[in-house]
Each structure stands twice: as C-alpha cells, then as structure tokens.
Image: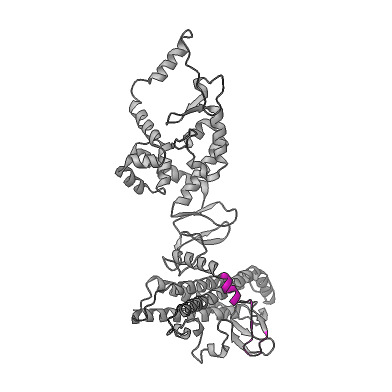
Amino acid sequence: MLAGTDLLPLMQRRLREVTEVLDLPPSAAGPLMRECGWAKERLFERYWSDQDRILAECGVRARAGAGQRKGNQEDGPASASSSSAAAAGSNPNEARPPLGECEICYDDEGFPPHRMFAMACGHSFCRGCWGGFLEVALTNGPACIRQTCPAAGCSELVTEEEYAELAPPDHLARFRSYQLRNFVESNPMTRWCPGPGCERVAVGSGRMDGTESGGLVAECSDCDLSFCLRCGEEPHAPVGCRDLGKWNEKCKNESETANWILANTKPCPKCSSRIEKNQGCNHMSCSGCKYEFCWICMGPWSDHGANTGGYYKCNKYDPNEDGAADQSDSAKAKRELDRYLHYYKRYHAHAEAQKFAKRQLKETEARMVLLQEQSDNSLWTDVEFLKAANEQLVVCRRVLKHTYSFAYYMPVDKDDASSKARRERFEYHQEMLERFTENLSELSEKPLAEMDRTDVVNQTRVVDRFMKNVLRYVDEGMEED
C-alpha cells in the first residue's frame, strides 16, 4: 500500500515516455493517456492507427499540432509576433499592439497582450476571466480534468498547462490531485483503499486469495482492511468479481422476498418456541425443551454427527425436491425461487455468523486478559491462540458465505456425469469446511474455564489448512487426480 502522492513519480514517468515516443507536449500526453486507461501500448496502437481521430476525441488536436510546430521552430528564427513585440518594445514611437477583446467580460477598454491568454486553439480571453473560469471548473471535482475551452463549441481540453500559467498554486495542486486520482481509478492494477477517509493506494503486488477468479487481495496496514483489488469488495474467493456483482444485484432485487421468508427468529422444530440465533455456531439448543437442531436445515443435530455420516449434508441443493416434472411457467418460477432461497439462506447464515465473529474478535483481547490472569505464570503469547482462532473464524465464515454464491452460478449439466461429479465433490469439500468451522466456533465460544488451548490451536490449524486446500482445488478446476 502506498500513499497517493507516492504514485505521482510513476504517473509522470509514463507521461514522459509517451511524450518522447510520440513527440507530443506533456499537456497533450495526459488526456491521451486518460482516454486509454493509462496503458501506453493501447495508446500507441490507437495513435498510430488513426492519429487525427484520437487527438480530436481527446480534445488536444490543436495542442499537439502547436507542440510539434514549436519543436520544429526551436532552433529557427523567432516568430513574427515575438519579433514585432520586441521591436515595439525597443522603439516607443512605433504603434503599440491593438488592445484585445475578451469574449467573456467584453470590457469596453480592452486588454493589452500581456493581460490576454490564448490556448492552442487560438481562443483568447483576459487572464481575470481565465482565473474565474478555472476556479469554477474545480468546483466540479474530478470532472474538471475534462473541462474544455470557454469558447462556445470548442472541444480543446483545458490542461495542467493552463492551471500552471493562470491559476494560483493551490488550484494547480487540486487539479494535479484530480489527475492523479484518475490515474489510480483508471488503472486496473491500482485502487484506493475503501476504508473511510483512507488515502492509501493498493498497487498490483498483492497475493492471490485462493483463486484468480476470486480476486487479487490487497491489505491496508493503516486501517487494517482487506479488499479485492479488482472490484473493491471484501475478499470473495472462490466466487469471481463478475459473479459476485450479479449475486449482489440479485440479492438486492429480491431482498424483500428473501427477508420476508427468512425471519430473524425460527420456531423450535419440537416445541415451536421462537428462538433467536445470537451466536455464530449453527448448533442450536432450545432453552425450553432442550431439543438440539441445525439452524440451517432445522433437522435434528444428531443427523449431523460423524456416526450418521451426516455432517452438513444440508448444504446440498436437490432440484428433485422441487417437482422438476412440472414444466409450467409458474412451476419453473417456483423452482428458481426455491433454488435461489436455498443458497441465499445459507449465504445469509454465514454472513450473520461472520458479523458475530467480527464482534467477538473485538472482545477477544479482554477475554485474553482474563485467560492470562486465570493461568498461573502464563505469558501473553500463551493466550494469543484465542485471537488467532477468532481471526480464522472471520475468514472461514467469509469464504463459506461466498461458496454459496459460487455454487449458485456453477454450471451443471444433468446429462454430463463429469459435471455432476464436479458439483458433488465441491459440495463435499464445502460440507467438510463447514464442519471444521462449526467445531472451531464451538470451541472458541466456550467459557474460559472450560476452554482447552490445545484443542483450539489444533482446530485452528486444521481449518486454515483445509480452507486453503479448498480454494486451491477450485482454482485448479475442481478436477480430481
């Protein structure tokens, strides 16, 4: 992670490379690079294929031509205007240059040449009006970098060159900051940290979070935040950025239906008492009748144990339960809603468990202090296992949450045995990860007096290793050796 200003030398270096290769002034190179997403190769390809078109589209045709003419005349004689101005200055009896008229303020007295300024397009205005124009342009925020000449119908772009000549230093600094922001936001390998008020920038040198489709993860040390470099969302492996966007949009559009079906409380399957889930674990126990059941599928918890082979079989979606034989439009709509709700309920459950794990993580340090006080001669490092376990739970809940959005968009061909087997293998690994995570959640939520450090440490390592293996398995195409 870098400070935004640390990227300024990188941006300036790219501009210099463009000016040297294309023989353009820096004021023209900036808009051209912005148009091409600050990708030099893309700019070179477009420029050499149709030079006039891209210069016109970027509003720097006149500026580029003026820059090239200036370069050709650097070693030649001075221009006629500068020669006449010098001559007029040396002979006071000669007629002075005529006063210029500003087409913004139309001052009756006119302005001498030194109080007028013209861009490369030739439209000239008094410096006072220029200063006010540039100040107003800055009020548009980042859009000011696309401001054009004040003359009606002129598409020539106002650049840093005009701000350097006509605006006070603080206005120039603001314009440069907006151009730097565009450099960050247009570059696919850089992104501002989404933390509130954070001005750090992530550059494409992070680590892959399990799968390439899951996004490149950046970590901000200032605000202790992890996010996807490609889309700016929280790390979301194994689901890709595109599918995550579709899933979030779908949840937004159908949230009222889903929230109506998914209440914050559920009735006990045995005594029908309303139960609120206030912890992260899905192993529920009714305070009234003591019946133990799974919060996800509402089935008896005894069916989720190792002895029955159940584990977390409720993670699987069975389309045959939806009456697949009925092909009417209403039946198809119901099956699609049921399918969505199957994945959304489990996605929502892990999202809530992730929130609980985050809240628990904030309280971990206080629990660590109590645990250290309860243990004779224990060091702080002896109780750090509790923080590691809670951090692991936050990550696992996040990954499990996104395995359901990933599974929703996973293509399945009912007539293709390999496709069906691939889904079954994924659901098995998903089931096992849920089992390990639930075990760790139960261990970490125990009262301090009942907590076994060795069990928590071992389970944390098991969960971490298995989670990474699952993500690697998805990244490699979910093919068995």
Observer able to see residue 131 = yes
Q: Indicate the quadrant where residue 455 lies.
A: bottom right
Q: What is the x, y in percent for residue 462? A: 50, 78
Observer able to see residue 21 = no
Name the one closer to the observer, 34 or 40.
Answer: 34
Query: Against 217, is 470 above or below?
Result: below
User: In the image, which residues are magenta?
Assistant: 255-273
Q: How is the image coloured?
A: one colour
Can you name the residue that lies furthest to the bottom here?
307
Q: What is the x, y in percent for residue 64? A: 38, 35
Quadrant occupied by the C terminus: bottom left
Residue 261 in magenta stretch: yes
Q: What is the x, y in percent for residue 57? A: 39, 42
Can you name the residue that lies furthest to the top here?
93
Q: Residue at x 44, y 85 (%)?
A: 320
Q: Residue at x 39, y 74 (%)?
A: 411
Name the one closer to the observer, 289 or 97.
Answer: 97
Disc count in the image? 0
Q: In screen coordinates, is 370 left or right of 315?
A: right
Residue 284 in magenta stretch: no
